Image: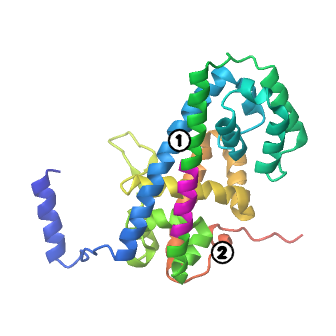
């Protein structure tokens, strides 16, 4: 609709008494929003530099990713200290000690020896000095962004822990997702019911049909995309770590095929959004309440 029509309808809703008063963000909400913006700033910077690093490693050190992930802290230290596989190979004894120290002994010896062997016999193009310097700078930037994100997460956790209801939400979906929801004005305590809260995230369903054509049900995506992004990540963690959610998800995938995997993740997101509203009202989270459990048939 045009702006004038939309403004008229909003005004009519307000004067009819069906609209709610606009809530100004509190000082705590504004502080959380600022921290979330800082986190996103460093997260985006980290992601871009990780992509640059992947391209450089494929060219100059392709073997390293068989042993270390791109977000590995050990890889960061190796890049900052050496930059190129050739420089690491020339100082293999010190490099092995560094890997054991940085990984706190968790990096197995086979991987350490594999990395050293890969650096000595790398099939990548040898770095010139400026390329090695660029890899060192990438390592430093990745480390800086990671540490900034870690510091912001600690500060957000401290802000959330002073409120018992927010602390319960944090235990359910994590402090970062809780903070992102609050920063997007999605505090469940400000919504009248679970369906309204789910709709505020843009997770309510819509169907586009015309005449004989019957469209599929899809989420509206009318809420803040940032909130859905972190809810999606929280849902994936829930599938990985919660045995009840994992069983439900795997049963759906087995029954309907792999092509519907995303659909079932979104379905669980919708359930999780409603559960968050109840947790915001002071109820304890119980994953069993998200699903209909069929009664056992006695023999």
Is the residue 230 above or below the residue 258 in the image?
below
Q: Are marks 2 and 1 in contact (CB under 8 Å)?
A: no
Identify residue for label 1: 47
| Residue 278 falls inside the magenta stretch | no
Residue 210 lies, in percent from the top left, at 32, 42
Q: Nearer the viewer, residue 274 or 61?
A: 61
Q: Residue at x 54, y 74 (%)?
A: 158
Report helix, strand or loop for mark 1.
helix
Q: Residue at x 75, y 16 (%)?
A: 123
Identify residue for label 2: 286
Please tell me whether the stretch drawn in magenta is mainly helix, strand or loop: helix
Compared across the picture, whether 94 is left or right of 249 comes to right
Q: Residues within 10 Å of mark 2 (few under 14, many from 20)?
A: few
| Residue 154 falls inside the magenta stretch | yes
Residue 153 lies, in percent from the top left, at 55, 63
Q: Residue at x 34, y 76 (%)?
A: 26
Residue 184 lies, in percent from the top left, at 39, 63
Report helix, strand or loop for mark 2.
loop
Of the numbered discs in the image, which one, if any, rests on residue 5?
none
For the C terminus, the image quarter is bottom right
Mark nearer the N terminus (2 vs 1): 1
Q: Nearer the viewer, residue 190 or 244?
A: 190
Which of pointers 2 and 1 indicates the residue nearer the eye?
A: 1
Which of the 4 quarters of the picture holds residue 4? Answer: bottom left
Residue 40 lies, in percent from the top left, at 46, 52
Q: Which residues are drawn in magenta?
A: 145-156
Is the residue 73 above or below the residue 93 in the image?
below
Q: Residues within 10 Å of mark 1 (few under 14, many from 20)?
A: some
């Amino acid at each position: 609709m045009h702006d004038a029509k939309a403004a008229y309808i909003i005004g009519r809703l307000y004067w009819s008494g069906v609209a709610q008063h606009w809530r100004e963000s509190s000082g705590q909400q504004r502080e959380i929003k600022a921290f979330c913006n800082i986190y996103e700033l460093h997260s985006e910077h980290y992601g871009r530099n990780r992509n640059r690093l992947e391209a450089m490693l494929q060219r100059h050190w392709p073997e390293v990713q068989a042993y270390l992930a791109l977000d590995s802290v050990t890889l960061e230290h190796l890049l900052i200290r050496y930059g190129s596989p050739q420089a690491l190979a020339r100082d293999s004894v010190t490099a092995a000690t560094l890997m054991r120290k940085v990984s706190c002994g968790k990096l197995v010896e086979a991987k350490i020896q594999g990395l050293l062997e890969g650096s000595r016999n790398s099939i990548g193009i040898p770095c010139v000095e400026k390329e090695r310097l660029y890899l060192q700078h990438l390592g430093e930037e990745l480390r800086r962004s990671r540490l900034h994100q870690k510091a912001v997460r600690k500060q957000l956790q401290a802000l959330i822990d002073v409120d018992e209801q927010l602390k319960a939400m944090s235990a359910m979906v994590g402090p970062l997702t809780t903070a992102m929801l609050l920063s997007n004005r999605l505090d469940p305590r400000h919504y009248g019911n679970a369906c309204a809260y789910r709709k505020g995230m843009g997770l309510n369903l819509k169907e586009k049909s015309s005449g004989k054509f019957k469209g599929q049900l899809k989420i509206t995506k009318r809420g803040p995309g940032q909130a859905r992004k972190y809810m999606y990540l929280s849902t994936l963690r829930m599938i990985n770590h919660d045995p009840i959610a994992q069983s439900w998800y795997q049963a759906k995938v087995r029954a309907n095929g792999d092509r519907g995997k995303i659909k079932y993740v979104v379905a669980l997101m919708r359930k999780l959004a409603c559960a968050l509203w109840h947790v915001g009202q002071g109820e304890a989270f119980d994953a069993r309440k998200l699903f209909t459990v069929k009664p056992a048939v006695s023999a």
